[in-house]
Image (tube, rainbow, N blue to C red):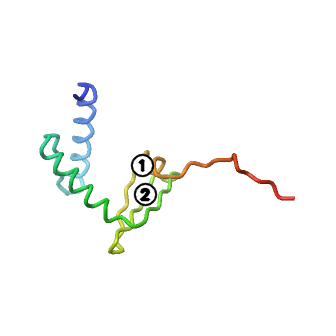
């Protein structure tokens, strides 16, 4: 079950996004209904399954997905690029002579 504070934050975020899109004269749709979310998740899973390459750029908060047909999808996110980037390790560092 969603915490009431989380639900308020989600409502505020969706309202803000719809309002911003309205300023651009573009309409958006919002749903939090369980059946609709299940459908959206299924569509997203199918869409993600077409990804054949990923470019994650944490420094600019962007991920580019390259799909099987060569098309690109760009996602701006403060979290996703960090989740996808391979962590740097210094344990196997070798010094040149």
Label 2's element? strand
Which residue is labeled 2 in the image?
63
Residue 76 falls left or right of residue 45: right
- Taking depth in this image into account, of 8 and 65 the one nearest to the observer is 65
Q: Could you give the CA–CA distance between mark 1 and mark 2, rounded to whole angstroms?
A: 7 Å
Where does label 1 land, which residue? 80
Say whether marks 1 and 2 touch (CB < 8 Å).
yes
Q: Position of residue 82 (x, y in %)?
A: 48, 48
Q: Residue furthest top?
A: 4
Residue drawn at point x = 39 percent, y = 63 percent: 65
Q: Nearer the viewer, residue 15 or 92?
A: 92
Q: Which residue lies most toward the right here?
A: 97
Location of residue 52 by image quarter: bottom left
Residue 46 location, x and y as percent? Answer: 25, 60
The location of residue 51, given as percent across then percent down, is 36, 64
The residue nearer to you, when weighing 61 against 46, is 46
Q: Position of residue 54 (x, y in %)?
A: 44, 62
Residue 96 occupies quadrant: bottom right
Task: State which tag comes first along the sequence, 1 or 2.
Answer: 2
Q: Does 2 appear above or below 70?
A: above
The quadrant of the picture occupied by the N terminus is top left
Q: Residue at x 22, y 35 (%)?
A: 11
The one nearer the camera, 71 or 20, is: 71
Q: Quick one: SS at disc 1?
A: helix
User: How many neighbours does mark 1 have within 10 angstroms: few (below 14), some (14-19), or many (20 or more)?
Assistant: some
In the picture, measured across the screen, residue 83 lies left or right of residue 50, that is right
| Residue count near mark 2 (Cα–Cα under 10 Å), binned few <14, some 14–19, many ≥20 | many
Q: Is residue 33 left or right of residue 75?
A: left
Q: Quadrant of the C terminus?
A: bottom right
């Amino acid at each position: 079950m969603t915490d009431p504070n989380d639900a308020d934050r989600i409502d505020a975020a969706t309202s803000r996004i719809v309002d911003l899109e309205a300023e651009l004269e573009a309409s958006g749709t919002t749903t939090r209904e369980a059946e609709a979310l299940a459908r959206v998740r299924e569509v997203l899973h199918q869409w993600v399954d077409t990804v054949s390459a990923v470019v994650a750029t944490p420094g600019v908060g962007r991920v580019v997905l390259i799909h099987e047909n060569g098309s690109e999808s760009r996602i701006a996110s403060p979290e996703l690029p960090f989740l996808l980037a391979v962590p740097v390790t210094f344990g196997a560092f070798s010094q040149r002579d």
